[in-house]
Image (spheres, helix red, strand yellow):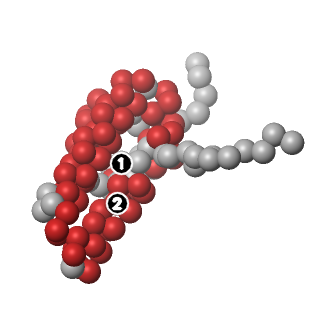
Amino acid sequence: MPGGRPSKYSQQVADRLIEELGEGKSIRQICKAHDMPSAKTVNAWFHRYPELRRRYLGVCETREMYLIDEILADGPDAFMSPAARHAADTAIWKLRRMQPKARKPVPFVLYQSHE
């Protein structure tokens, strides 16, 4: 018999997690609920359950497209006001912050010395 505590993983918990991620909540926000597992546990589930990971990446991609559409909705002239620029900057910050860790952009090296 394996040791350790029993997992809280269930299809209902996974569905709720994906649904709330799709509503724009972060993993940390969702996991603050008393009936949800910790963020650390959820991140471990992404490695243990490939279907959950696939669904997570899908909802992240959809959320990214939604936020990008939101930023671009009013066209380039909308960025003339400071308030509009601030709203766009906030949406971009949120988009970057909520990206899955494995998908965060890697710095691009323009020149590397080969000495």
SS type, badge 2: helix
Give the answer, above or below, for where 47 lies relative to 33. above
Q: Residue at x 58, y 46 (%)?
A: 108
Q: Quadrant of the N terminus?
A: top right
User: Looking at numbered disc 1 in the image, what kind of residue is underneath it?
Assistant: Met
Q: Quadrant of the C terminus?
A: top right
Q: Position of residue 27 (x, y in %)?
A: 38, 51
User: Looking at numbered disc 2 in the image, what kind of residue is underneath it?
Assistant: Ile
Give the answer, above or below, for where 94 lies relative to 36. below
Q: Residue at x 42, y 24 (%)?
A: 50
Q: Nearer the viewer, residue 90 or 47?
A: 90
Q: Residue furthest right?
A: 115
Q: Residues within 10 Å of mark 1 (few under 14, many from 20)?
A: some
SS type, badge 1: loop
Q: Position of residue 28 (x, y in %)?
A: 41, 56
Q: Position of residue 61 (x, y in %)?
A: 30, 39
Q: Nearer the viewer, residue 113 or 98?
A: 113
Q: Residue furthest top?
A: 1
Q: Which residue is mark 1?
A: 36
Q: Residues within 10 Å of mark 2 (few under 14, many from 20)?
A: some
Which image quadrant is residue 17 in?
Answer: top left
Give the answer, above or below, for where 85 lies relative to 61. below
Q: Which residue is mark 2?
A: 92
Image check: 70 left or right of 96? left
- Distance CA(mark 2)–CA(mark 1): 28 Å
Q: Position of residue 67 (x, y in %)?
A: 24, 53
Q: Residue at x 17, y 69 (%)?
A: 78
- Mark 2 or mark 1: which comes first in sequence? 1
